[in-house]
Image: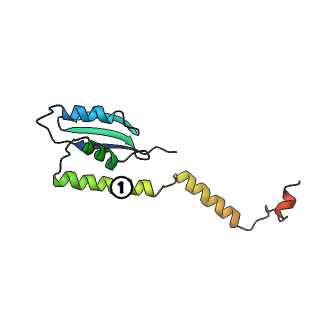
Amino acid sequence: MLEKLKHRSIRICPSPDDPDVVKSATELLKDVKGVLNVRIASPNRLVVSYNVRRITLQIIEALLTEFGFKLQTSLFCRLMRNLCYYIEDNECSNPIHDQAECTRDAFITRYIRRKHGCRDHRPEYLRRYL
């Protein structure tokens, strides 16, 4: 199974109760399955690297929200968030084959359908005994 690595930026609203809110979110995400790396990029932003075949940005952000972290809700953040959700949903629902695999399958299909002298015209049950 090929890995589809994503690197996304998550903006978290600062909290007066917890001045190290981004550090707390980083510690929470380090133990999540599918998340490969989490680092603090600025006082209100963290960068998450993850395998999209195991976990998506939507699940990561839902987890943060469930644990009480407030995500920034500016128009730009919401637009980028929804665009990422859409892209990852398409990647997960439509498994795209590797280019080499598609090319190989095309050649195999063409070879099978083409008339040539390399065919064994005996029935299947006779081919197994020789």
Which residue of the protein is positioned furthest toward the left in this rendering?
16
Q: How many marks?
A: 1
Residue 116: percent from left, percent from top:
76, 65
Residue at horizontal 20 percent and vertical 42 percent from the top: 12
Q: In the figure, residue 70 lies in which quadrant?
A: top left
Q: Considering depth in this image, is 94 or 29 the residue closer to the camera?
A: 29
Identify the secondary structure beneath mark 1: helix
Q: Amino acid at mark 1?
A: Ile
Residue 25: percent from left, percent from top:
25, 36
Q: 78 left or right of 17?
A: right
Q: In the figure, residue 82 lies in which quadrant?
A: bottom left
Q: Please give the residue where the numbered disc 1 appears in the rendered image.
A: 87
Above or below: residue 83 compared with residue 15: below
Task: Specify the color scheme.
Answer: rainbow
Residue 13: percent from left, percent from top:
16, 42
Q: Considering depth in this image, is 23 or 80 the residue closer to the camera?
A: 23
Residue at horizontal 25 percent and vertical 38 percent from the top: 46
Q: Considering depth in this image, is 57 or 117 the residue closer to the camera?
A: 57
Residue at horizontal 41 percent and vertical 40 percent from the top: 34
Q: 19 left or right of 97?
A: left
Q: 88 left or right of 81?
A: right
Residue 84: percent from left, percent from top:
31, 52
Specify few, some or many for label 1: CA neighbours under 10 Å numbering under 14, 14-19, or 20 or more.
few
Residue at horizontal 40 percent and vertical 38 percent from the top: 33
